[in-house]
Image: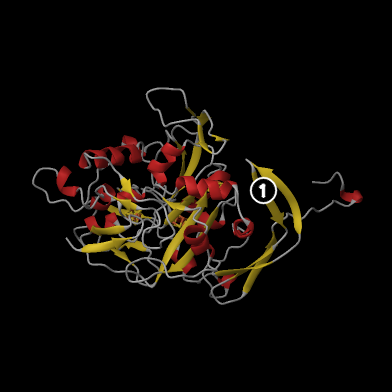
Amino acid sequence: MPSVYNWHLGRSMGYPYEQAAPKEQFAFVININRCIGCQTCTMACKSTWTFSKGQEHMWWTNVETKPYGGYPQHWDVKILDLLEKANPNGQRWSGSPNGEALSPYGRFEGKTVFESANYVARGNQPNHVLGYLPTDEEWHSPNIFEDHVQHGQSKPMDFGKGEDLDGDKKHQAWFYYLARLCNHCSYPACLAACPRNAIYKRPEDGIVLIDQKECRGYRKCVEACPYKKSMYRGTTRTSEKCIACYPRIEGNDPECEGAPMETRCMAACIGQVRMQGLVKVKPDTTWMEDRQNPLYYLIHVAKVALPLYPQFGTEPNGFYIPPRWVPTRYLEQMFGPGVSRAVERYRNPDRELLAVLQLFRRSNQIIAKYEIEEGKKVYETSSNGKKFEMYDDTIIAFNRLGKEIFRTKVEEPVHVRPPQHANSI
Ligand code: SF4
Ligand code: SF4
Ligand code: SF4
């Protein structure tokens, strides 16, 4: 099997195809701390792309309540279980999260879904990827266990509890909303498993698509995708998946005058928790330095956003700011070893991070670059013994064409309603 470089794992890994990378890569960041589980993103995608016959159970983006919710049901528990069997010595990481672009989270010493396939091959069928095919029942309830709470004291699911970070108490009872869509992985498992080569990754933006003319509905992609984001449609007997709203990414919407536009699920987010963009990548899929790109900043400079289940090995391009109230042990299984650092940074944001966090959902256009104009200090306090200062900086966002798309301030402006409209809605 060829060897490719996976920077999430901090090492090379086996993958059925040779190393390749697009010119730019579709990527996104979701701030879990602010998601309100309103499902507006879910419905924005559904009403745009999957409202037809045969697509009733197709939710290309969904929001599930963790730890119990999952669509399809128990998808992550099941794949983690398979990985555990393939890794008798555990899914371990060595080293520690550091500042290196080649291995920012340390090194994953276990086997990925590509490297474990032989351990769980079924019968004599050669498998390229470790996986399973969900049952029809598991696809039936897209929002099962909504708002169900995990209690820190309960057994047998003990995810850890107590004081994780200098005095920051983790909650005894907790849940959180995990918004998910296809990660347009750098090493897609769906693509690796397709016997007809019907799945391809676009060289211009890394978007992963299924060629509907080539697909024969073998469902190998459904079986292989560890995130279960490729779905089978009975009426056409083909598999379908998130298409990253590619007409919008290509800048075909008249509203943007040729500049790339954010996808439907990102642009519709009520909670203002989603930011999507395009990042420049090198031939080994590591990111080129692009200091003023907000995604580059959040993932590689501030390091507050982490990949979802990096140990699967697909190098997903969806990143999450982990929820600060949830036990670290549980989060580390989901987001890897960078969790403590990310939560700590989010709890005590510095001046630049506080400004960049204001960029979420102020525009439909993809932000290619930001600049900050410094303002005056407006607030000072201490949190857990650390000094916190807030400055009313102005942050300016530019699109791909270099045009300013908006500017906003750290301190939210207060508008006083004129007395003649005091009681109006
Ligand atoms: S998330 Fe799944 S469907 Fe999407 S690119 Fe990765 S492996 Fe393929
Ligand atoms: S990017 Fe577009 S197609 Fe993909 S989940 Fe979001 S709205 Fe649906
Ligand atoms: S629209 Fe935004 S806030 Fe609402 S569920 Fe989706 S990600 Fe969360």
Is residue 306 visible in this depiction of the protein? yes
In front of the other: 168 or 362: 168
Residue drawn 35% across and 36% down? 74
Question: In screen coordinates, is 26 left or right of 118?
Answer: right
In the rendered image, which residue does mark 1 sit on?
A: 387
Instruction: Mark 1: give few (<14), some (14-19) or many (20+) Cα within 10 Å.
Output: few
Question: In screen coordinates, is 131 left or right of 276?
Answer: left
Amino acid type of the residue tagged 1 in the rendering: Lys
Of the four image quadrants, the one with ligand 2 is: bottom left
Question: In screen coordinates, is 370 left or right of 146?
Answer: right
Question: In screen coordinates, is 101 left or right of 167?
Answer: left
Q: Quadrant of the N terminus?
A: bottom left
Is 11 rendered above or below residue 231? below
Residue 350 lies, in percent from the top left, at 61, 55
Is residue 44 visible in this depiction of the protein? no
Residue 400 lies, in percent from the top left, at 54, 74
Residue drawn 60% across and 56% down? 357
Judged from this view, the residue extending furthest toward the left is: 124
Question: In what element is the residue under mark 1?
Answer: strand
